[in-house]
Amino acid sequence: MERNQNLKNNTSENIAILIPQFYWGGMPQVASNLIQLLEKKYNITLILVNSELEIRKETYGAKVIRLQGNPLKKLIQLRYLLKKEKYKAVISLGIIDNLLNILLAPKRTITIITEHSTKSFDNEIETNLIKKRLYIWGLKKIYPRANRIVAVSNGIKEDLEDNYQLKNIVTIYNPILLINQQEELTENDSKLIEDIRKRQGKIVINVGRITRPKGQLNLVNSFKYLKGKNIHLILIGEGPDLKEIERIVELNGMHDNIHFVGSRQNVITWMKEADIYASLSWFEGFPTALLEAISAGIPVLTADILSGPREILSNGRLKSYKKTIRYPYSLENGVLTKRFDFRESNFDEKDIEIDFARVLETMVLEKKDDYSYCLDFLENNDILRRYEEIIESK
């Protein structure tokens, strides 16, 4: 095991955060924010199961342990570490690490597993049949053994209750800490924005790992219906589907309006330069990018997926995802378009993309300024208190 040795030794108030990696995606950012929040009360050890990936998120004052070797060796190391260090609580992120937390943590340790996406969607797109069956079995048989299941949105809580009959669930939103995401733009980034503005263009932004379920391809397809409208889409991120999306852009002659800038840490700075944040993600948990956009003072346009957007766009007022609404549905922080649910028999991706383009164009032309850009329902001290209550429970 590789350690950062410069920090505090174990005390009775030590806790651990178990996560696969700190390289890409929403979970490492959430874990980073959680470390910054919880270290006010506890000494934190960050345990990374995938030790091969670079650490790209802030670890603050946490001791970092990176498990080494093949999967079996890592399993043995983790079991030894959890028994030796006697953590008061272990908080895990991701289904594999959640299962490891429950199965390997000593009985005296409080096991807190966190869910960051709608698992029924996750399992639907899983192509490995063995993994799919393992995950469903783990959700139904192993998850109930955790001391507490934390759902990061009410949509996830509903999904776990309705599809996996889980009961020991509490909704605790992710903390939002944006201090380190406002560095200045690079010279090339500034030039891109300046060139668009010189042409009186409107800027739509999307941030995230570029994969099929994150919906960037659907978003690009929706721009086919906005040709000649001087509306520009800037995609911030990297991922396995980037080449395919670049091919679609070239094939449809959209290179003047679709811009790829790669991965960036200063997303708040970028968002402050945009007119709208847009998402056609298939499913989410509690998407940080939406929180960042609202914090930057721009409206959000997103499909009404089954976790996250309703709560975020309504400033916590609209919590149920079962209530029928009429689209497009305007809320305090943006607009919801038709529900993106690929599991439905009458699901039509093209119809969703066309409708999304229509609403996006309307939002750009209307230039509404009556959004509240308010996230009052997120209170970091309350989030800290609720985690503390679980950690200190008997």
Image (cartoon, rainbow, N blue to C red):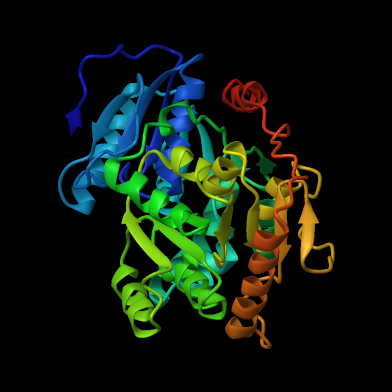
The quadrant where residue 371 appears: top right
Residue occupying image coordinates x 45% and y 54%: 198
Is residue 129 shown to the viewer in this render?
A: yes
Camera sees residue 166: no
| 58 or 92: nearer the viewer | 58
Residue 184, x across and y down, in percent: 37, 33
Left or right: 324, with 376 as reference point: right
Tell me: residue 8, above or below residue 25: above
- Please state if 92 lies on the left or on the right of 149 as rendered: left
The residue shown at (38%, 42%) is 19
Which image quadrant is residue 367 in? bottom right
- Seen from this angle, which residue lies furthest bottom? 346
Q: Position of residue 387 (x, y in %)?
A: 60, 27
- Rendered position, 368 above or below 174: below
Where 56 falls versus 85 (above or below)? Answer: below
Q: Nearer the viewer, residue 158 or 34?
A: 34
Above or below residue 211? Residue 393 is above
Q: Quadrant of the C terminus?
A: top right
Q: Residue at x 51, y 14 (%)?
A: 41
Q: Position of residue 379 (x, y in %)?
A: 67, 27
